[in-house]
Amino acid sequence: MKFPKKLSDKSKIIYLNHCGVSPLYQGAVDAGHFFAKKHHALGINIFSKYGQILDLLHKAVASFLSTKDSNISFIRNTAEGLSMIAESFPFKKGDEIISYEHEYPSNHYPWLLQTRKGVKLILLKNSVLNKKKISENIAHLWSLEDLERAITKKTRIIALSHVQFTSGFSANLKRLGNICKNRNIFLIVDAAQSMGAMPLYPEKWNISAITSSGWKWLMGPIGSGLLYTSPNLRDNLSFTMAGADLMKQGENYLDHKWQPYKDGRRFEYSTPSYELAYQLLACFNDIFNKYSIEKIYKQIVNLQHIFLKEIDVKLFYPIEFPPEHSSCILSMISNRNPIHIAHDALESNNLCISARENYVRIGIHFYNTPEKVKKAAKILNRLGAK
């Protein structure tokens, strides 16, 4: 694939930490500068000139997810989206939520809070890979069989990450969606570790909600996030957050009639950061709606294979899943402390990777070059041998 000049990898740092925080895409940097200058020049008139930014972002994200723009909301982060859904869902005492014991905190605490209402939070345990028990310090994954056994007539929500942030294990969302559809369960997906790197089709896969941060694989600004919700889910939610932007009467601020938006705008209840939205819009316009997400993911997988050919598996044991559970994150076990390896890689070798739990995590995005990926593997081989 040929990439836009603003995506060319000219940095001295080999950046393989898109599962942590991505470098901000240059086109987004330019968009932020543009908006800030216009805000400086126009003041409040920025809204009359550029107030359509959210509408444009809704349409761009909807196109990416193959849905309607009315199902898209611009939010601040993954946790905000999950919290708004969890707090507004009509749980009754005895209802059940199924999740996984090693979820990222943003996809755990919003559901844990519901236990104060008498809701039961059922956490799937680490499971089996290729019929061999994988110990807790080697791979974090859950079993679809365990999930199906956990479902009861009281199960209302299944809340799982598309990709586990530690091991890189990915859920088969199509199968999960079918299970939920057949049992009238809402499937809520944390896509912070997949949106921008892997295909996501909520309507085809019967997903009720998808939420993601904007600063990982989407290469957007810190403090930006996205939320997809299905009309059926929204129809079941109450309103827990409110502000002027929630109401259809707009700037008629003394009209206090309760006339809230019922589409995705219901989650954009008060003044958002238009500058961050404009930056995120640039990412979608220039990258994710320009290049097929299937081709982006294929390129990521190709670069992972190049990396794996160069890495010394005696020093770094890669956690490799079957194709249906592999992802954009490649995690490895090392004899050395992963935190020390990540620190040495950046401080002495201009290689940015990340460490989570017992893993060295490699987050290669599609614009990286084979040459830099090979160099990264050689650097890690040297560091792992210390």
Image (tube, rainbow, N blue to C red):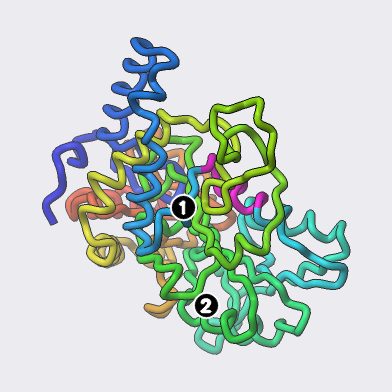
Secondary structure found at label 1:
strand
Mark 2 or mark 1, which is nearer to you? 1
Q: Is residue 160 left or right of residue 285?
A: right
Mark closest to the chain's N terminus, 2 or 1: 1
Residue 308 on image: x %, y %:
30, 65
Q: Is residue 287 above or below residue 12?
A: below
Amino acid under label 2?
A: Gly
Residue furthest top as drawn: 41
Asked if labels 1 and 2 touch by Cβ distance under 8 angstroms, the answer is no
Q: On the image, which quarter does residue 116 sit in?
A: bottom right
Q: What type of secondary structure mainly makes up the magenta span?
A: helix
Q: Quadrant of the N terminus?
A: bottom left
Measuring 15% from the left and 43% from the top, which residue is drawn there?
4
Q: Which residues are magenta?
A: 75-84
Q: Residue at x 57, y 81 (%)?
A: 181
**Residue receiving disc 1:** 72
Closer-to-camera residue (378/117):
117
Within 10 Å of disc 1 (Cα), the crowding (few <14, some 14-19, many 20+) is many
The image shows residue 269 at horizontal and vertical percentages of 60, 39
Q: Give whichever of 298, 223 is nearer the camera.
A: 223
- Left of 272 or right of it: where is 293? left
Which element type, helix, strand or loop, lies under badge 2? Answer: helix
Check residue 323 for magenta coloring: no
The Cα–Cα distance between marks 2 and 1, rounded to whole angstroms, is 19 Å
Residue 313 percent coordinates (x, y): 37, 67
Q: Which residue is mark 2?
A: 177
